Amino acid sequence: MTTEQNRTKVWVEAMRLRTLPVSVAGVLAAVALSEIYGCFKLLPSLVCLLFAVLAQIASNFANEYFDYRGGLDRKGRVGPRRGVTEGDITPEAMLRATIATLGAACAAGCLLIIWGGWELVPVGLLVAGGVFAYSAGPYPLSHHALGEVAVVLFFGIIPVNMTYYIMSHQFGLAIFMVSLGIGLMGANILLVNNYRDIDDDRAAGKHTLATVFGGKFASTLYLLNGWVAMALAAPLFIELPVAVWVAPALYLGCHTMLWCALLKSRGSALNRLLGMTALNMLAFVLVFALIVFII
């Protein structure tokens, strides 16, 4: 492998591709909802998707940089390779990449003002602040057992409701319920991550739900999150043709099997499970959206 190829691989790893389905899923869920309620618009949907993915990549970069600065990562960790900790990426380069990617996300966000109006600016500032608040500042959310709460807010409630608002200029209870469900599914990705890293996090003094309440609590919450997410969306599904129920049925079947695998897995084996959790979430939204657009 050439030096250039190796450099590219290191940066791709830093993007945490396994986690990106969570940002895509929130926007696609809003797209399906906008089609249901007759307000779908293609161009703003694509810009929302671009903004969401760029913001998540910026968050992943920032998390790696600030965890390194805080001494919370160590070489040879069980989870995905950390380029900064391993010496593949300099801290300065990672900080520059974080700022540049967040700047690109903000540029995409400014385009959304065309459809959503200037009232989007405070939301955009909140998202930009969340990129850093997750792992930096005087009270990093991910270090104080609030990471899952942040995921529910920034990858569920905000993207689903605001993407839908940009196309419809309306909010609704059904939209909020689905957004909360999407957030809970996204939180499961972080739960697997923290379940895997429980020993490393405890050694580093990092507080997560897994380190505070234990692995059994984290695995049980993983199971409950998926089922509660589908229960939150059930009132909407009841109003739609029966074909839509294929999406939650497939999701819950896979989710329950993944939970069983979670109970039996340890260490690096959980990396694959994390990716499968993210893909199951994305598959649910894709199937749901596909059925909605077909019927």
Image (tube, rainbow, N blue to C red):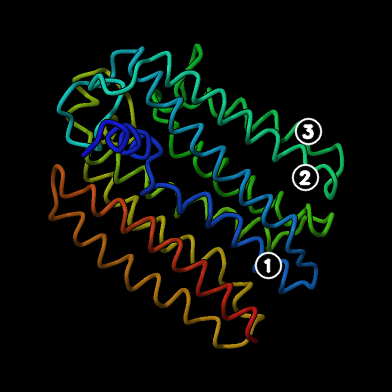
Q: Position of residue 183 (x, y in %)?
A: 52, 50
Query: Separation of disc 1 and disc 2 at Cα?
Result: 18 Å
Under mark 3, the amino acid is Val
Residue 33's label in the rendered image is: 1
Q: Are marks 1 and 2 in contact (CB under 8 Å)?
A: no
Query: Separation of disc 1 and disc 3 at Cα?
Result: 23 Å
Q: Residue at x 33, y 17 (%)?
A: 68
Tell me the quarter of the picture where residue 104 sits. top right
Count residues near mark 2 (Cα–Cα under 10 Å), then give few for <14, some for 14-19, many for 20+: many
* Residue labelled with disc 3: 121
Q: Residue at x 38, y 60 (%)?
A: 279
Under mark 1, the amino acid is Leu
Q: Position of residue 246 (x, y in %)?
A: 47, 82
Q: 36 left or right of 132?
A: right
Residue 112's label in the rendered image is: 2
Q: SS of the residue at dot 1?
A: helix
Query: Separation of disc 3 and disc 2 at Cα?
Result: 10 Å
